[in-house]
Amino acid sequence: MKFVDTHLERAWRTVGGEDGPAPHPLPREGQLLTLEQWHAVRDTWPTGLRTGVVLSNTVDVQSLAVDLPRLALVVLQFPKWTDGRAYSQARVLRQRLRYAGEIRATGDVLVDMMPLLHRCGVDAVVMRHDQSLDDAQRALRFFEGHYQGDAVEHRPMFRREVSA
């Protein structure tokens, strides 16, 4: 899993200013758009331009299915650590919609969430400022395997090859 430091992040830039997001951003490489911005420009947006979108956890990600091949990054928001809707969004993106781009969790992301985020298909996180990177990396090693299949290993444990 990739841990993103927003102070060092250079690959992705949000579009907007002091008054909020720009309603019709100009096409540029590495732009991170709100869903509203994306809907406003997607019909005229150049194909092949590395673009990302930020989704609220209330959005039905299946409504984005036709756009996914054009998106390199989908950012899922966790407004509270107790609100798990973004876990479901990640799982739908990876398993039902076969999204191969980066899925990034942001917001109230805690160390304790790392194993489940990984199992749901999230491959990058922006952790809450008071969380430890070392603890998060350690949390990813808590379990060697799971009985159920998930977004990382689709087959349940009893269907996997056993090595002697």
Image (cartoon, rainbow, N blue to C red):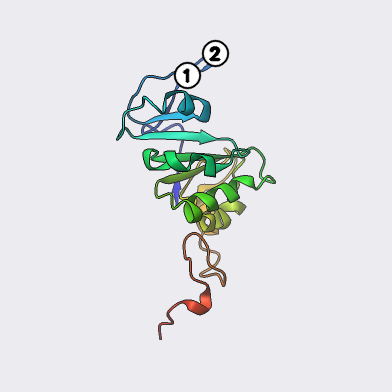
Q: Which residue is mark 2?
A: 19
Q: Secondary structure at mark 2?
A: loop
Say above or below: 14 vs 73: above
Circle 1 residues within 10 Å: few <14, some 14–19, many ≥20: some
Q: What residue is rendered at 44% in x and 41% in y? A: 66
**Residue 4 shows in this picture:** no
Asked whether the beta carbons under mark 1 and mark 2 sit within 8 Å of each other, the answer is yes
Q: What residue is rendered at 61% in x and 53% in y? A: 112
Say above or below: 79 vs 157: above
Left or right? Give the position of 66 relative to 136. left
Q: What residue is rendered at 47% in x and 40% in y? A: 74
**Residue 36 shows in this picture:** yes
Identity, as a three-letter code, of the amino acid under mark 2: Asp
Q: Position of residue 24 (x, y in %)?
A: 44, 18
Q: Which residue is mark 1?
A: 16
Q: Position of residue 39 (x, y in %)?
A: 48, 27
